Amino acid sequence: MNPIESILKEYPLMILDGALATELEKRGLDINDALWSAKVLAENPEVIRQVHYDYFASGADCAITASYQATIEGFQKRGYSEAEAVALIKKSVELALKAREDFWREPSNRKSRPYPVVAGSVGPYGAYLADGSEYRGDYKLTEKELMDFHRPRIKALVESGTDILACETVPSFVEAKAIAKLLEEFKGIYAWISFSCKNDFEISDGTSIFQCAKWLEDFESIAAIGINCTAPKYVPSLIGEIAKGSSKFIVVYPNSGEEYNAESKDWHGECSSDAYGLSAKQWYEAGAKLIGGCCRTSPKDIQAIAAWARK
């Protein structure tokens, strides 16, 4: 059964986790690298398991694996063999599954919440390029080329026992179509597709999110449609546009609200967990049923969502 539907039949909201890379940096790891957090899969995997555990402890019903930037091609550029690359992608699922079992083993952790889900992260082609194009969607690949690129990682994630796929930060309509068609090759697996968006109405390549949602409506394997790695101020309008185009569940996990400077490669502005939690409640009231956080969010932000959602 669709794992999202299973949870939402019994609970009003499915709480996702927050940023993985932000937490890895807080714990002293250097991820300033083309592989980004995927680098840690090879070098210090136990820290990834601990971050997943901490998000469960903060109230998350879902851990998103450290495979966003983990691709066969990306690992091969670093000298790994294809088999080693596949093994590292599978390890991302194994770490999340282990964290879930460690957390659920304690009876007090099971009160008033569902058995958590593990979502295999499928980052966009632009994440592999590591040049910021996941926020532009301007790479000139065909649907078939994008399907061929994503297929090995999705296969590895599915074989590792992930409950669902998180196809996230998708910046272009062409890539969303490629992923939706590719998922039809994997019978019985469900996914959400979440877009990076540049304003209240459009995904990063300028396509209206309404058009994207409407096109994805007929794909049974797409369990939810939504937004991630986007400024929170755009989220209410985007939720409304998705709802106009599709009856599927809506997933939102934007950035913290701080602004990223691509030249200096740092973040500016302020945000608080209390403010993020209040915003999340407004997104829920607007129609979102899966809510978490992306860049710069933390376990405290997820705890702020759980504070009202568990009531």
Image: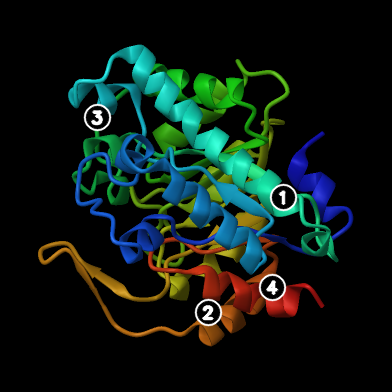
The residue where tag 4 is placed is 306
Mark toward the viewer: 4 or 3: 4
Instruction: Please report whichever mark, 4 or 1, sits nearer to the chain's N-terminal start.
Output: 1
Residue 219 locus on image (x, y percent): 67, 31
Mark toward the viewer: 2 or 1: 1
Residue 69 locus on image (x, y percent): 35, 39
Report the residue at 33% width, 47% height from top. Answer: 205
Q: How many marks?
A: 4
Depth check, front residue: 107 or 115? 107
Gap between marks 2 and 1 measured at Cα: 22 Å
Report the residue at 26% width, 20% height from top. Answer: 80
The residue where tag 2 is placed is 276
Instruction: Please report whichever mark, 3 or 1, sits nearer to the chain's N-terminal start.
Output: 1
Q: Within the image, what quadrant is residue 286 found in?
A: bottom right
Mark toward the viewer: 3 or 1: 1
Q: Which amino acid type is marked by label 4?
A: Ala
Q: Residues within 10 Å of mark 1 (few under 14, many from 20)?
A: many
Gap between marks 4 and 3 measured at Cα: 41 Å
Q: Is residue 241 visible?
A: no
Q: Is the Cβ of the residue at disc 4 closer than 8 Å to that at disc 3?
A: no
Quadrant where the C terminus sits is bottom right
Depth check, front residue: 311 or 177? 311
Instruction: Please report whichever mark, 4 or 2, sits nearer to the chain's N-terminal start.
Output: 2
Q: Which amino acid type is marked by label 1?
A: Pro
Q: Secondary structure at mark 1?
A: loop
Q: Is residue 60 above or below residue 269?
A: above
Q: Secondary structure at mark 2?
A: helix
Mark toward the viewer: 4 or 2: 4
Residue 193: assigned label: none
